Amino acid sequence: MTMTTASTQQTTNTAGLYYIKTHGCQMNEEDSNKMGNLLQEQCQMSPCTSVQDADLIILNTCSIREKAQEKVFSELGRWRKEIKCKDDVVIAVAGCVASQEADEIFKRAPFVKIVIGPQTIHRLGDLYRQCKSSKKRQIDVSFPAIEKFDHLPQNTESAVSSFLTIMEGCNKFCSYCIVPYTRGEEISRDFKNVIEEAKHLARTGAREIVLLGQNVNDYYGKIDETIDGNLALLIQTISQIPGIERIRFTTSHPQAFDDTLIDAYDARNTKLCNHLHLPVQSGSNRILKNMKRDYTIEKYLEIIDQLRCKRPGLPISTDIIVGFPGETEDDFQQTMALVDRVKFDSSFSFIYSPRPGTPASELVDEVPLEEKKSRLARLQTRLKYYADQIALSMVGQTVTVLVEGMSKKSNRQLSGRTENNRIVNFPGDASFLGQIVHVTITEKCQNSLRGRLVSGADQAQANHSTDRQSLAAAT
Ligand code: 5AD
Ligand code: SF4
């Protein structure tokens, strides 16, 4: 799920400007938001949109695949040239590459002044001040037990759709994955703290909350000394917060998908979006075993069948890796068969990338790169077919859309998301921002949908049932 974003807002603090570029997952995006809040509050800095203007430049990195990691050094080199070697500018590297490769970063990019890991972002302000006063490099890539959340300032304004991190780290140690080494041990935030943050997000403008963590269905945050919470209870409690209209969670793991979470998809819980991201990684039990995923395809399908009993046609998205060491054409065909069976609504698919220090990187990998590329292309064609079929089935349907902002292309168009996370652009004015509206889908575009607002009287009927019914017919 690699994406790249750069900070865009401009505000009026005066003690200097910062620029943040984010690689990687939503956890990184949220860490970047938090670092921005912290710099505004603790250092009175303001965001800017270009590295040339910045006093502090932060690259929040991802190391999930080799390509993402290599991008760090090319980007740092480019920035070094762009800022024309101004020595008073501080360049910081944060995130998963920082956590694993601090020495390598200082060696290959000696102009980097701060290296900070994902669990210590709350110390960024101190490191920046120390760096400025001492003119010495600063590094903190430790894993202090979940203290970062107690030390991060909250934002004064929240996005219509806001992330809320409920846990950090991962204990699953899938054989291919670097995350347990870069983000550390799985730790849940206390239940009360999460609910307080959800209420704060609602008060400051959030209508949708996306609960974040590497394995959110392992969430066990303490309710009190003796009772642990779970994800289903969290969803139920957040559903009752006034102003919150939609709840999503990502990422969950099939191994820990229990009955409480299946029951959370009860038709009565209308705030839990009609969508689930459930990474499967492979359709072959043999490969899943070698990946140390700890479930079988039968178990994966059973979860989906149970969920689709509660919510017919529940749209599912997934992550798939091809070319894992030892994957045969037959294993790959089992992945293709799974795609035909589940008809994923959307997906992220990757060629396996060996990560240093992970058990899979020791395995003999006999699958030639050309073959891996061919498998990825065949898989993506099949995945796109189903994603397009679902989008086409939505044309003519009236669905609920949470209006998140103005469209990027026109200030007379609104942009929002359906429950199954499809972007819809449609004519409308700013008075609809933050509302859930009924939109009739008129056209499928390359990566989005176009629609028109249902007339005023019918808007009053806006509820979640229509698009759930139309999607049920598509899968
Ligand atoms: N190679 C390729 N893909 C990977 N992912 C995680 N580690 C690797 C790797 N070494 C993918 C998985 C995961 C997603 C976030 O990234 O599909 O679900
Ligand atoms: Fe990586 Fe597996 Fe943990 Fe996901 S569950 S972060 S793939 S180790």
Image (cartoon, rainbow, N blue to C red):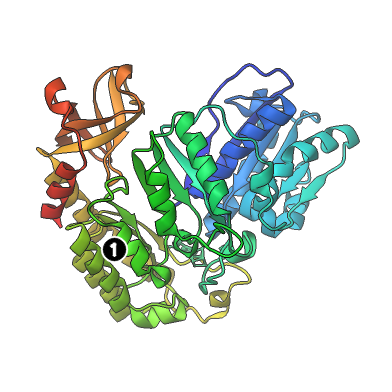
Quarter that holds the C terminus:
bottom left
- The answer to which image quadrant residue 403 occupies is top left
In the depicted structure, whether residue 229 falls above or below residue 52:
below
Q: Front-most of 267 and 345? A: 267
Q: Front-most of 322 and 249? A: 249
Q: Residue at x 19, y 64 (%)?
A: 309
Hey, which residue is sitting farthest right in the picture? Answer: 134
Q: Residue at x 21, y 60 (%)?
A: 310
Residue 156 left/right relative to 272 = right
- The answer to which image quadrant residue 208 occupies is top left
Q: Residue at x 35, y 81 (%)?
A: 285
- The answer to which image quadrant residue 426 occupies is top left
Residue 270 left/right relative to 364 = left
Residue 11, percent across and down? 59, 19
In the depicted structure, whether residue 301 falls above or below residue 402:
below
Q: Can residue 391 be seen here?
A: yes
Q: Is mark 1 within 8 Å of ligand 1?
A: no
Query: Label 1: how many residues lie within 10 Å, few (<14), some (14-19) or many (20+)?
Result: many
**How many discs appear?**
1
Q: Residue at x 71, y 41 (%)?
A: 92
Residue 82, percent across and down? 66, 30
Residue 460 left/right relative to 4 = left
Residue located beneath label 1 in the image: 379
Residue 463, percent across and down? 20, 38
Residue 149, percent across and down? 63, 46
Q: Can residue 329 be seen here?
A: no
Residue type beneath disc 1: Leu
Please, what secondary structure does the residue beneath circle 1 have? helix
In the depicted structure, whether residue 231 falls above or below residue 36:
below
